[in-house]
Amino acid sequence: MSRNLILGAALSSMVVLAALVSFVWTPHDHAALDIPAKLQPPNVQHWFGTDHFGRDMFSMIMVGARTSIAVALVAVGIGMALGVPLGLTAAARKGSWLDEVIMRGNDLVFAFPSLVIAILITAVFGAGAINAIIAIGIFNIPVFARITRGAALSLWEREFILAARVSGKGAARISAEHILPNVANLLIVQGTIQFSLGILAEAGLSYVGLGAQPPTPSWGRMLADAQTMVSFAPHLALIPGFAIIVTVLGLNLLGDGLRDWLDPRIRVARV
Amino acid sequence: MSLLQIKDLSLTIHGAQILKRINLSIDAGQIVAVTGESGSGKSMTALAVMQLLPSGAEADGSLQLDGQNLLNQSEAQMCALRGAAIGMVFQEPMTALNPVKTIGDQVMETILIHKAMPPARARARAKEVLSRVGLPTHRFPMSRYPHELSGGQRQRVVIAMAIALRPRLLIADEPTTALDVTTQAQILDLLKGLVSEYGMGLLMITHDLAVVADMADQIVIMRHGEVVETGTTEHLLHHMQHPYTRMLFEASGHQVSLPLSPNPYPLLEVEDVVRDYRLPRTHLFGAPGHHRAVDQVSFTLNRGERLGLVGESGCGKSTLTRAILGLEDVQHGRISLGGQPVFTGHTPNLAVRRKMQVVFQDPYGSFNPRHRVARLITEPFHLLDTPPTGSERRDRIAEMLVAVGLSPNDASRYIHEFSGGQRQRIAIARALIIRPELILFDEAISALDVSVRARILDLLAELCATYDLTYLFISHDLSVVRTITDRVLVMQAGRIVEQGATEQVFAQPRHPYTRTLIDAAPRLPEMGQGAA
Amino acid sequence: MLRYALKRLLSLVLSLAVASVVIFAVIEVAPGDPASFMLGVNAQADTLAALRAELGLDVSKIERYFNWVGGMLAGDFGTSYTYRTPVSQMIADRLWVSLPLAIYALTLSTLIAFPAGLYAAARRGKPGDVAVMGATQLGIAVPNFWFAMMLVLVFAINLRWFNAGGFAGWENGLWTGLQSLTLPAIALALPQGAILARVMRSALLDILAEDFMRTARAKGLSRRQALWRHGVRNALIPVLTIIGLQFSFLLAGSIIIEQVFYLPGLGRLVFQAISARDLIVVESVVMLLVFAVIMVNFLVDLAYAAVDPRLRSRT
């Protein structure tokens, strides 16, 4: 096992653990206002300091991890659940009109960056965490469809697939039995990378107010709140920023480490 | 003094011993062939001379080119020698050229990088060399890109690059392995001609003993990183000392005797089959072109018969194989097995499919790496209405594994635990397990080393006796087809140009193409009796 | 080549048509009538009808779609519900901020990525490679808007080298304009540059493993000469793909970055329009962004053909 894998797994599990623990315990109530104690820098009582309402930053970061992880995880789930079958189908029916429609559809979705989807949805339905999930999730669909199709196409050329066809197995059965298990590693690695991109996208959306709405804490909104105070209370911006960096870095290292461990030939698409 | 003198060359890569005290020498104008099976270290010897070894390699001993020890040269000095004093030709012409540069630029680069002459003269020289290797610029302009040339033509470009500066030593690493026999014969002739014309020394790496016997002045036999035997071709062929050398030559010309086939009556009938592929349009509004891969092919394969199908790449034999297997629909004609059509309408007929199985070429790509052998070889059970279960299934698996020379315990192992030859045995077990009436061997032994190949041929002969096999053996290797089939079809450009009893066709080919094919194939000479 | 370009062009027109239908349909499901939203709940029925006619809302949906698309083709994006000014004018003003920003950032990211990727690939496994890869790993993990805040903190608030926000305008000279865009462009470029550098490196490493690189070395090229003469152009093919994809991310990213620097670009226009429910502005800006992305990908497809002769002759 590589250093990347160990470090990545450690950082990622630390963040996930913080999110899980926040359900039963946080050092302070993350929503409790304490105006007299506002804008304290990190100290013994408040490990990460307090914000402009005197709320405990450490507790907010812990609870905020929940939002980030939930949004990114569900978004990746949507992308995989829809993208992988689409990619498998396109590969199984290579060159057919169905393949063409799926691939052109993918190209079309790629023309709508997740932020643009979020803007559209928000313009119509108003802002919220669900919109962020849908926006990031929709964008993940073509990512998974493409890499699944690409990997599946090269597998379809392999002789063991021909052997399965000679044994009378149909496209659906071959996809499930032979293709999917052989692209699983790739999907795990890409899933980890998309997860980290989801964390970044969620932070960006909630920073501009298109993500989770108050009172749900989120790292992106903590940064938005910090913006006007950054000159006299830099910890307000530094701490949520570090939280995002640690999480994303951890997931990326985990993805790279998993790739090297599972199959060094896997190519990760990263945009 | 020798042009190249290798003395006690040893090589380790990351500590693993690759070469052990190799000795060989080449004189100007001489062809030395280094041969052996995979893993013998023959290619590494070539790369050591070029000093293009993979990272982690450490060489020891001496490599003298005209008295200059190459192992002591700095990287900059080696750059000055490579391409100028030593040229090299590689195995894979399809990937050996940069796809985004023209062939003219690539040949000129050899000249310009050594600042051997000004650009205008370099251009003239490139033109001259390309013509010399058989690519005259009026037919193959220097502005062509590699993808516009065939494999054989690309190999000529690679040779042109290697000889542009008239190097004293030319190294050719399996230069014709990726080529068809007729192309191979032309490239070998070209190399021979260049050696005598330029007085170069040629270090030729090849696994093909027939090529070796045909080309070399001197033969070096390697195994596991060691030279086991060396000598002049004439002498070595008649006085082989080492048992490995004898085994190698025996395996290359390995003959098997097939049992007589039972009373013939038709099993597979192919009538007037045509398969067209649409080509992409060449003009915006022009009609798309067609490529006729299989052109009105008809033949009959009798029960119990071992039929061969030979032809060069692109002749349509793969397409025909896929059509027979029901993997690909045909536009015209009829393929039937035991009287039943392979296709009903456009869907393959399951009742026919269960009577056929196939063994493919690539022992590494033929199996799902995530399944165990038991699951791999029972995949054809899917074709049966009531596949065997429980102990019956286990017995069938064990029987098959034993039949192909493996052990019943191998059923629970994964495919990566087996060697290439063992994998081909497993592939045969998979094909046999539902007792098909017909087996197709699609280049099934082409990827194997000669000694492994000889044993698989023995296995096939043995299985013919036990199971009354009927098979279609598709191959480009004439010597193998000659020993393993009763009757043979010769295919060229989608058509069957000749068919008949194998011995008859090989001894007295009637069609000019068959003659070309047989003449082009390098032959092992009649071997003298070993002196040992 | 011509056939290839025409085929791409056809696919571009088709994508744009489908995208416009999707955008129009999404905006159509928005609850509420813009006219009554603008006039408030107490509006008279006849003033409402007059306004609806003025806004072109009184015809069927299909007709409205074609009016919208037809207008855009003629450069008329309709009239803003809120400001009652032509949307095309509003967009044109903002475009002079957003487009230079995206191009500036793309240039910077390419300028960071190429040398970094080349350097790392040439020194694979050595300390230089490890350092560059570590830095890019970090660069990918940094959210650009947070990085922007840090840049403001250091270079605007503490060092006072740049203004913390706002846009000085192009009328005061190119340099003044560029200066207001420098911090935003750096913030946008850094994470994208990090990604591009990694792509560049791995593309080069793939090429280094190709047979033709060994052929080049056998001709007498040094490692460095082989990398430059045979590696770079082949590696451009995957790198171009990523540059094309990145453009859409830079556009989207610039919408967020404009918030950090209070830049009067398309991003701010969109957010103002959303809060004022000025849907025609949202619709038009989104269409414009999608148009830009599709257009850039078309150009990337053409660039492929320029780099790769196999593509030119295949079609």
Image (tube, rainbow, N blue to C red):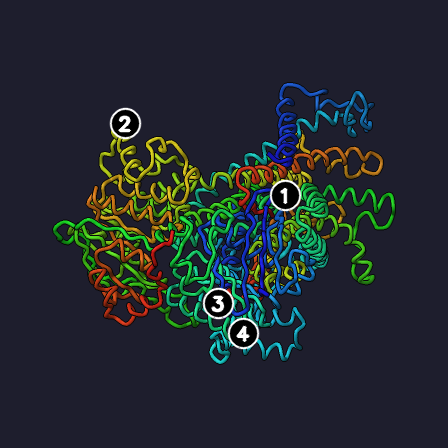
Question: Can residue C291 be seen at all in this image of the molecule?
Answer: no
Q: Amino acid at mark 1?
A: Gly
- Judge the density around disc 2: few (<14), some (14-19), many (≥20) Cα neighbours within 10 Å: few
Q: Is residue B299 above or below residue C192?
A: below
Chain for numbered disc 4: B
Query: Which residue is label 2 attached to?
Result: B390
Estimate the x, y position of residue C298 in percent, counting from the top left: 56, 61
In the picture provided, is C10 more to the left or to the right than B71? Answer: left
* Residue B194 or residue C253, whichever sits in front: B194
Name the front one of labels 4 and 2.
4
Q: Nearer the viewer, mark 2 or mark 1?
A: 2
The residue at which mark 1 appears reads as C40
Please state which amino acid type lies under the numbered disc 2. Answer: Gly
Depicted B66 relative to depicted A137: above or below? below
A99 over B68 or under it: above or below: above
Secondary structure under tag 1 reads loop
Residue B532 placed where, x, y %? 38, 51
Q: Earlier in the sequence, mark 4 or mark 3?
A: 3
Element on which disc 4 rests: helix
Eye-nearest disc, 1 or 3: 3
